[in-house]
Amino acid sequence: MLNRLVVVLLMAFASVVVSADYAGHKSAPAFIDKMVTVHGFDEAQVTGWLTAAEKKQSILDAISRPAEKTMTWKSYRNIFLGQKRIDQGVLFWNENKETLRRASAELGVDEQIIVSIIGVETRYGRNTGKYRVIDALATLGFDYEPRSKFFAKELEQFLLLAREQNQDPLTLKGSYAGAMGYGQFIPSSYRAYAIDFDGDGIADIWNNPVDAIGSVANYFKQHRWEKGEVVFSRAHISDNYDKSTLNEKIRPHYTLDEVVGFGFTPVNTELSGNEKVVPLMYEGKYGKEFWLGFDNFYVITRYNRSRLYAMAVWQLSEELRFSFEKQLHH
């Protein structure tokens, strides 16, 4: 009996430690003051939300080892290019055909890219995240030093979003980094790019695929996606290609003619010499792969900065388009 009592007391103590009571954190007073004075929130309410927020060690562990930084393209590709994800994508496309057609026409984004983003992010809404967003953003905003400023701002945006959408901030769920809904928008992106695409007065990307499709398309439109334009081209390399130009994390700024001079020749011979590109290298199944990324490649990296992510989105989009069109002709 005594042992059982000790176990119960230890479990109770552990839960107290985990809950962390972020209202008592040294950074909390400034945060609470900002929510009250700048945004007009009730002090007791904000304090209550921070008190209810729980510190999650699993979030701190996950953010320190994202797949984009630890995996090669060969391994990363296998996560997203499986037949099941392609089949599920064609099903999602069929179920939302009219919405996708309208989003593409009105917002100027290729249908397969919209479907692919939602497929890579959440398997078409199946896996939208298991963490309470308030736990994720409080844990990272107060206890993840490398990016605490960024996540504290996202926590601020999240509380504003919950108020605007008339949602309880303690119930909304998302990823370990606080991203939400079909397209995994962080709160600032939700407020900036989510749109009400079915006209019911609410931009709901948590549960509404119509709004989610419109919102992903709007995100791409605002970041200047060019419908129907090239995303990637394979490249042949010369013996003395210039390695220093590979994998730059800035908007493509070399012309095709320039990169040919650096030793990268596009396989796609129909491209003009003035297209802006960046040379890229991926560790593939059969060794190094060389590609040229165009402006549309860069737009995908505005969603997630990883070049692995951008390639996965594009290759999945091509598989989806091929499979969708094939079933139309059967």
Image (cartoon, rainbow, N blue to C red):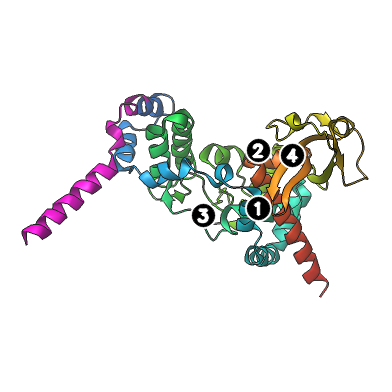
Residue 14 lies in the magenta-colored region: yes
SS state under label 4? strand
Residue 93 located left or right of residue 16: right
Bounds of the magenta span? 1-30
182 vs 260: above or below: below
Q: Are marks 1 and 4 in contact (CB under 8 Å)?
A: no
Residue 62 located left or right of residue 304: left
Please give the residue where the numbered disc 3 appears in the rendered image. 128
Please tell me which residue is depicted at 87% across the width and 46% down the height of the picture: 267
Q: Which mark is residue 302?
A: 2
Residue 324 position within the rendered picture, expressed as x and y whole percent measured from the top left: 76, 65
Please give the residue where the numbered disc 4 appears in the rendered image. 280
Q: Nearer the viewer, mark 2 or mark 1?
A: 1
Residue 243 position within the rendered picture, expressed as x and y whole percent measured from the top left: 75, 32
Q: Earlier in the sequence, mark 4 or mark 3?
A: 3
Report, in whole angstroms, how far the alpha carbon at label 4 lies from the one at label 3.
31 Å
Which of the pair 107/224 is nearer the observer? 224
Q: Are marks 3 and 1 in contact (CB under 8 Å)?
A: no
129 vs 44: above or below: below
Q: Residue furthest bottom?
A: 330
Residue 201 located left or right of residue 287: left
Please tell me which residue is depicted at 59% across the width and 50% down the height of the picture: 183
SS state under label 2? helix
